[in-house]
Amino acid sequence: MNMEQYITTNWKEIREKVRAVCKHHNNFDDLLQDLTICLLEKPNFYQMDLLLKGKVQHWFVSSANIQFKSTTSPYYYKYKKFLNKTCELTDYNSPLVQEQEADRVEVVKELISKELNTYNVYTRTLTSEHLLGGKSYSQISREYKINRKYIADIVTPAKQEIIKNVKEQCKQLF
């Protein structure tokens, strides 16, 4: 049996293994085709060695793993890098929709600010840093020199209450 016959007879099994390695990526078939061509271009003694040792499927899986995870592989440059630089057409929003979303964000921020005014200054300051400022508990801890656990104990209950109230108000507005 030569390499072409082996690949033909075991194609389904090899395909499923490469698919699993690529985590069902859209272009895993392209990677599989590239690997197949690469293996068939190898010298005959290399192909026969893989066949005799029963390591053909192992070669496909390990090569797919290396190609898929490496940022310097030909697969990355052909497919993954291109996909990372492009965006879906469905992601496009017209300027009107973008403006509406920006208005909604402003309304939500105003609602959060109003809810924050019901808390004491200390809780209001820490919670506004987290909710409106986008800072993590660790960042707030470093900035104000307060224990992170203590910040979490203060901010988390207030945050949950504010989010619940804002969601209710947003249902009425939108």
Image: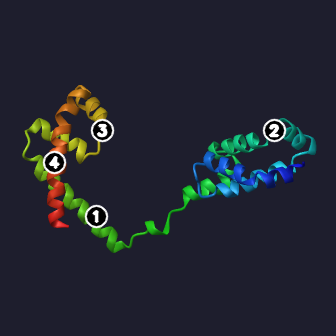
Q: Nearer the viewer, residue 54 or 44?
A: 54
Q: Secondary structure at mark 3?
A: loop
Label 4 crowd (10 A; few <14 / some 14-19 / many >=20): many
Of the residues under marks 4 and 2, which one precedes in the sequence? 2
- Amino acid type assigned to the residue bearing label 1 in the image: Ala
Residue behind mark 4: 162
Of the residues under marks 1 and 4, which one precedes in the sequence? 1
Label 3 crowd (10 A; few <14 / some 14-19 / many >=20): few
- Residues at marks 3 and 4 touching, judged by CB atoms closer than 8 Å: no
Report how far apart the C-alphas of labels 1 and 3 lie in the structure: 23 Å
Q: Secondary structure at mark 1?
A: helix
| Residue 129 image point, x, y percent | 22, 42
Q: Nearer the viewer, residue 12 or 66?
A: 12
- Amino acid type assigned to the residue bearing label 4 in the image: Ile
Quadrant where the C terminus sits is: bottom left
Of the residues under marks 1 and 2, which one precedes in the sequence? 2
Residue at horizontal 19 percent and vertical 44 percent from the top: 160
Report how far apart the C-alphas of labels 2 and 3 lie in the structure: 52 Å
- Residues at marks 1 and 2 touching, judged by CB atoms closer than 8 Å: no
- Amino acid type assigned to the residue bearing label 2 in the image: Gly
Residue behind mark 2: 54
Residue behind mark 3: 136
Q: Nearer the viewer, mark 2 or mark 3?
A: 2
- Residues at marks 1 and 4 touching, judged by CB atoms closer than 8 Å: no
Of the residues under marks 1 and 3, which one precedes in the sequence? 1
Residue behind mark 1: 102
| Residue 124 image point, x, y percent | 13, 41
| Residue 143 image point, x, y percent | 26, 32
Q: Is residue 51 left or right of residue 94?
A: right
Q: Nearer the viewer, mark 3 or mark 4?
A: 4
- Residues at marks 4 and 2 touching, judged by CB atoms closer than 8 Å: no
Q: Nearer the viewer, residue 155 or 110?
A: 155
